[in-house]
Image (spheres, rainbow, N blue to C red):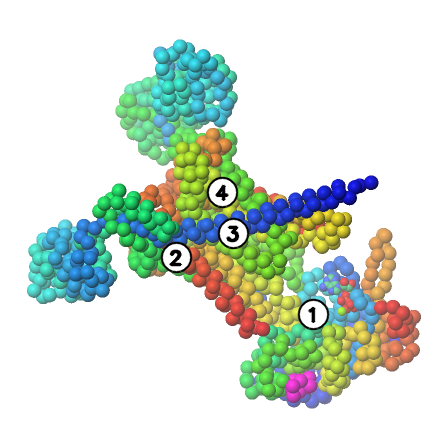
Amino acid sequence: MSSMELNAGNQLGALSQKGQLLASVLQNETTDGININKRPRVGEIIIQNLLLICGVVSIVTTVLIVYTLLNQAIGFFNSLAWLPARTLTVNSSIERVAIPNPIDATSTEISLVTEAGELVGALQRIPYSEGQMIRIGDEIMLVQSVGRRAITVDRGTEGSTATNHEAGIPIEVLISNPIRLGEELSATDNQIALQTVGTLPFTVEQVIRIHNEDMRIIEVAADNTSITVERGYNGTEAIVQPSGEAVMASKQPSLTEFLTHTKWQPQIGEFGVLPLVYATLMTTIIALLVAVPLGLGAAVYLSEYASPRARSTLKPILEILAGVPTVVYGFFAITFMTPLLRGLLGADNVSIYNMASAGLVMGVMIVPTISSISEDALSAVPRSLREASYGLGATKLETIVRVIIPGALSGIIAAFILGMSRAVGETMIVAIAAGAGPASAINFLKPFQAGETMTGHIARISGGDLSYGSIDYNSIFAIGLALFVMTLILNLISGFIARRFREVYQ
Amino acid sequence: MNYTVSNSNKAVELKNVSIYYGDYRAVKDVSLDIERNKITAFIGPSGCGKSTVLRCINRMNDLVPGAHVEGEVLYRGRNLYADDVDAVEVRRRIGMVFQKPNPFPKSIYDNVAYGPRLLGVKDRKVLDQIVELSLQQAALWDEVKNDLKKSGLALSGGQQQRLCIARAIAVEPDIILMDEPCSALDPIATQRIEELMKELVKDYTIVIVTHNMQQAVRVSNYTAFYYIRKQEIDGKEIRWGELVEFGKTKQVFDQPEQEETSDYISGRFG
Amino acid sequence: MIEEGVFHDSIVKRNRRGKLWSRFYFGSLVIAIVALITLFLTVIDQAFGTVALSYVIDPATLADGRPLDQLSNEELADILTNNLSAGRARIVLRDNVIVNYNADTYTKQPIQELLQGRTFDSSVGEKTLGTLSVEEVGNILGQNLSTTTLLDIVTTEVIQEQILESWPLFQTLFNYNQIVAENAEKHPEGQLQFRSWINTRFLTTPMATEALKTGVRTALLGSLWIIAITIFVALPIGIGSAVYLEEYARTGTRSRLFNIINNIIEINIRNLAGVPSIIYGMLGLFVFVRLLGDVTQGRTILSAGLTMALLILPVIIINAQEAIRAVPYSIREASYGMGATRWQTVSRQVLPAALPGIMTGTILGVSRAVGETAPLIVVGAATFIVTDPSGFFSQFTALPIQVYQWTSLPQAEFRYVAAAAIVVLLILLMSLNATAIILRNRFSRRLA
Ligand SMILES: Nc1ncnc2c1ncn2[C@@H]1O[C@H](COP(=O)(O)OP(=O)(O)O)[C@@H](O)[C@H]1O
Ligand SMILES: [Mg+2]
């Protein structure tokens, strides 16, 4: 009712000059009444949805990352490494001697000299040779080199764990006996006679491989001379197998082994990621030892001491550091830092590829990350707090140390953790300067030795010709997953602390 | 609410309007009528909800996440908050001028032509005419006619605000809402805007928020006085704005009916 | 009662400590800056220097002392004619002009068939490659190859330049005598020469197995291709996400579910920015190279570009968000108040005003992509490739990959080559950043 009136009322007033102009060029600008009805704005809706899709791309990225890593890491844990099956027996023809000194879990050198300065057990010379396996207690070690008074060994091999050993435990020499077919095997026979010494290392359900044919073990004979199998397993063809053919045993990585063992060499069935993690931690710690004091010092200088002009010139210079590609830092590490370290500490003490050099340069690389976040945190500390401190007669330093840094502490910690995450994920510097090859956990406290980090290992493995089915290919994804989880946790913690910090001052 | 406008002269009618920001009710139960081709002033202490009410008249509050309106805002007999009403169309009919002059970082010409271009006017001649007419109406034409290409930001504060007015009227709106349009200006610029408003009101309906009571007296025909109410609930103080008094400006200022009004206009608080 | 002296002492001490520490703070900054300078100096040091070369034939004697690069095609061909054996000359012809050859090439196929579409004297048309004389080969080479290629052939085949040893720049500048002495002692035949490892040849030739001949052409083009794909993919998506998050997700009434999605997107982007780049490489390897292998054709420029696009997406989004947030709210209010729709407001007011910031952010992101190495290694950069990338589906290498490969080679000369490639990389980065600054200045002037 009233609406009718109003519309009518509007018609009465003639359109202004401008209204007529608008009406002359626009169709929906009519002279009668005003239309505020909902319009179908299809274009708007399409655009909004397109934009939403753009936003969702980043979620898709995360999903793809997680999917990739999980899917392929599961592939890794389901893949098998093939190793010649063998038994280990004690070689009794070599005299057993007791270790004269205690050995701790990380040392690779076993001294065989008694306090009197003679070889233990009145030996004339050390009876072991390179490549031999020895056993001390439950731990099996591989002899790497034999000196006149000591041997160096690879600790914790054959799936055993490196532990401490007391003096007096005997060293046993092991012989490895390959397991072969005892007699010719027809294509249908399920019972396999084996030529072997000692206890068979097989378990029921395990898959073995003899010359391209896979078999699943159904039963292991109690007398250790034969096994019963399912022939032609996994779609392989059951074939006639000649006598003496070597038996390959499969080994599957387990999560426990992955997380606890100290050897990484997937092709030969060593699935412990720890050495790579240790090397990563080592380079990260060195990097932080450089970056935290430098970054924090620079942040304090920029936020508390520098004049606005000095700040505006110095800060961009510092930020250039963050813009230099990491591969250039790698080049810097290997052409400048490594020779410098070798010059200072002696070429004998510092390998050409070493974790210290990579870590130090990485430290320089993270300085801007730490300094810029810390600086933000420092300048967020309210003026009133500073003034209160000065008002109590504190000097500038005292104010900084007692008031400003504690006030900004969580921001600084967030910066520190973020820097740590950067260092853990950094690839090129370590790939170029830290070295390669299967690292062992024992390198942990030896920064001047080569050490392969998680990222360095991934880069090295994928830099070669990777065949997609290989255990090497899958293994990098398992490492990638571990790396992703580590950095994600660090980033989340850092973000959480930073957010809490921001709340305090808002 | 002791004053009502005859139906045919109502530009906007607010019926029991309450406005919320999230769970917080900023304004409670406002009912008032705004008369066509008159100037209505909203006054009251800071935070009492003047801007909130003003912005609900052209649905600007839609842009604030969580803001919503209860009650009815009738415009030409339609509830602006009905489902079938297009907020964009509403804003095109009910224009707005803000507290701080906010010209676009574009030329004067482009600023004024912005609205017509949104509507789809492409014809350069038509645009030229609209720009000229709008700038004349906003009493800015003589000052800027020779450099329409100059950036709108290069003008003085008072000129910028008149540019914003020109920009608002270029689409020939029905109503112009002004939220403290002079608070950032010097007295001379303020005076020019006030004169301008008196001119504009011949063609448009104007609602103005002001904290300056003299201004309300000088320019407005009607005055709405809002006030902050407080209440303790469970030991927590709850505040909201309310319309306390509404009427002809002369009457509100000379013979206020409510005690708060007389206290406020005599400067006892606020 | 405190004696004045005691009080004074302690304040002096406190101030002294303050001064000491302020030096430490300043020192930290100085160390960082010194490290940066050292880094650049190391690169410069290695990118230029002295080399000891040995020749089979001294280039100075070849053309009566005229520099070889001023010779014409005919003169260069003459040098080849005069210095090559017929057999060697035929091989050069085969490798450089015929290219596709088989066992019959020498003895059965006539020249006119082998050299279809090339220029040659009609007198040799019937002959086979095996019966051409040195002069005839020389003529064909001179007629068909560019001067640079001929010069290359003269250098490799006639002069047979070889690096005996190289020394870096600063040693050349400050301790040249030692270089001379070392050279005299180790290789008496070595001719010392100043060499800029970065030179036009280096920029324009593809990779080679010898330090003297290798170049970054392929890698430079590969990097440019990857940048192009990265920008093309990441820029619209990045700006789109930022606009969505800032202009659509934050304002207006929305359902709970929507708010949850928006929050997830926000948090997710921050976390993506912290994912190590090598992980993106693994994503690229699995998703683009393998799962979508039919589309991307495996380890191609396209896979690399897409991987890089995902990698820099968070950087672009976060920077664009900041740029958009920096646009004053009053501009949006003004636009909405005029009856503009959301997209009208965004496209006509917000984006133009945020553009300089968005550009700077994008270029930051792209700079990151230019320098990233690890993801490309994992995605599968080619280890040796000499052909220019020709499209989305070419194999690729990129500047940082080259730096990495050359740095990792055991031969010392390649360190110098790596340094030269770093100089190219840094110049590319600097020009990108300069572009950003220029664009930003131009835009902000226009908007003022
Ligand atoms: N965008 C907003 N979000 C939440 N609360 C708001 C917002 N705008 C205004 N308010 C609140 O609404 C009340 C009224 O504000 P306003 O309308 O701006 O008052 P006035 O214009 O009268 O000074 C105030 O308490 C203010 O805090
Ligand atoms: Mg207000």
Q: Report the residue marked by disc 1.
A: B60
Where residue C2 appears, as percent x and y from the top left, is: 80, 41
- Judging from the image, mark 2 belongs to the subunit labelled C
* Residue C352, x across and y down, in percent: 56, 70
Give the CA separation, mark 4 to mark 3. 15 Å
| Separation of marks 1 and 4 at Cα, in angstroms | 56 Å
- Residues in magenta, as a range: B134-143
Q: Residue sitting at 51 percent across and 52 percent down?
A: C33
Q: Mark 1 lies on which chain?
A: B
What's the residue type where badge 1 is placed? Met
* Rendered image: mark on residue C424: 2
The residue at which mark 4 appears reads as: A360
Mark 3–mark 2 Cα distance, whole angstroms, equals 22 Å
Q: In which quarter of the image is ligand 1?
A: bottom right
Q: Which residue is drawn at 49% across and 39% down?
A: A283
The mark closer to the camera, 3 or 2, is: 3
Chain hosting mark 3 = C
Residue matched to label 3 = C33
